[in-house]
């Protein structure tokens, strides 16, 4: 279905509260937003809304068995909506959040099963980007942050490219300029007694291990 795109330009640091509020209002009503992160642009939706989550999969032509990563405003928001972090996760969050470290934790029953790909865990991080965190805070919940692209195409750091690819499929593009790009977030499973590397990324695995031993 063709959508009328709202493009909101904001500063990457100290974003305009009115623009953030407009984007958050659409997200709270089940809309889909392309948002900047500290790596690339992502697609945001309310992960507790099955209809909004399904829109993400439709927009991306993405297989529904693939889980969607989440971003949050801060540790407190993660705990409030996903549950307390295990001690291992708490230690890594204190060291690396905000930043490109995704922690895999147990998923609450309230989360749409489409978000978890039918599994029992979910990946979440607090990104080092003021706009992303402000949007999560304004929405009152963590948001999805899967890459803003059609599945099989490369992700992008350029908001103009996001509009070219997805402008007719999404509701709002929050344009904070070109994002830093670089490697994706490192993904670490902290549901067990020892950390397990799921995906190598921006934070070296050796640094993760050092933080745990500190």
Image (cartoon, grey):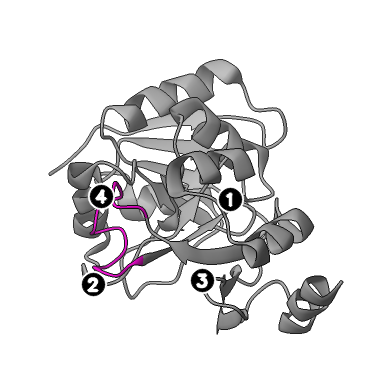
Dominant secondary structure, magenta: loop
Quadrant that contains the C terminus:
bottom right
Nearer to us: label 3 or label 4: 3
Q: What element carries label 2?
A: loop
Task: Give how far across and how far down residue 170 sits, in percent.
Answer: 29, 42
Task: Give how far across and how far down residue 131 sits, in percent.
Answer: 60, 37
The CA distance from mark 2 to mark 3 is 20 Å
Identify the mark nearer the N-term, 1 or 3.
1
Identify the mark nearer the N-term, 2 or 1.
1
Identify the mark nearer the N-term, 4 or 2.
4
Nearer to us: label 1 or label 3: 3
The quadrant where residue 149 appears: bottom left
| Residue ID at (72%, 72%) | 203
Tag of residue 37: 1
Compared with 162, 46 (above or below) is: above
Identify the mark nearer the N-term, 4 or 1.
1
User: Which of the pair 62/195 is nearer the observer?
Assistant: 195
Q: Which residue ends up furthest to the top in the rendered image?
A: 18
User: Which of the pair 86/182 is nearer the observer?
Assistant: 86
The CA distance from mark 4 to mark 1 is 19 Å
| Residue ID at (27%, 67%) | 117
Label 4, on which residue? 53
Q: Are marks 3 and 4 in contact (CB under 8 Å)?
A: no
Q: What stretch is highlighted in magenta?
A: 108-120
Which class describes the residues within 10 Å of circle 1: few (<14), some (14-19), or many (20+)?
Answer: many
User: Which of the pair 88/101 is nearer the observer?
Assistant: 88
The CA distance from mark 4 to mark 2 is 12 Å
Tag of residue 65: 2
Q: Are marks 2 and 3 in contact (CB under 8 Å)?
A: no
Labels in figure, total: 4
Label 3, on which residue? 191
């Amino acid at each position: 279905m063709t959508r009328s795109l709202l493009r909101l330009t904001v500063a990457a640091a100290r974003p305009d509260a009115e623009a953030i509020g407009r984007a958050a209002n659409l997200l709270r009503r089940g809309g889909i937003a392309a948002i900047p992160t500290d790596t690339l642009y992502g697609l945001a939706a309310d992960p507790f809304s099955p209809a909004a989550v399904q829109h993400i999969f439709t927009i991306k032509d993405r297989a529904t068995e693939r889980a969607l990563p989440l971003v949050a405003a801060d540790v407190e928001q993660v705990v409030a909506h996903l549950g307390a972090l295990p001690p291992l996760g708490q230690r890594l969050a204190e060291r690396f959040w905000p930043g490109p470290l995704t922690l895999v934790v147990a998923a609450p029953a309230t989360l749409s099963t489409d978000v978890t790909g039918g599994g029992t865990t979910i990946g979440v991080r607090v990104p080092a980007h003021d706009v992303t965190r402000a949007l999560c805070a304004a929405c009152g919940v963590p948001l999805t942050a899967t890459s803003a692209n059609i599945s099989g195409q490369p992700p992008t750091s350029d908001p103009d490219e996001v509009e070219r690819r997805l402008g007719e499929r999404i509701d709002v593009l929050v344009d904070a300029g070109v994002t830093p790009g670089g490697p994706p977030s490192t993904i670490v499973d902290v549901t067990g007694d020892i950390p397990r590397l799921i995906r190598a990324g921006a934070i070296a695995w050796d640094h993760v291990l050092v933080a745990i031993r500190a």
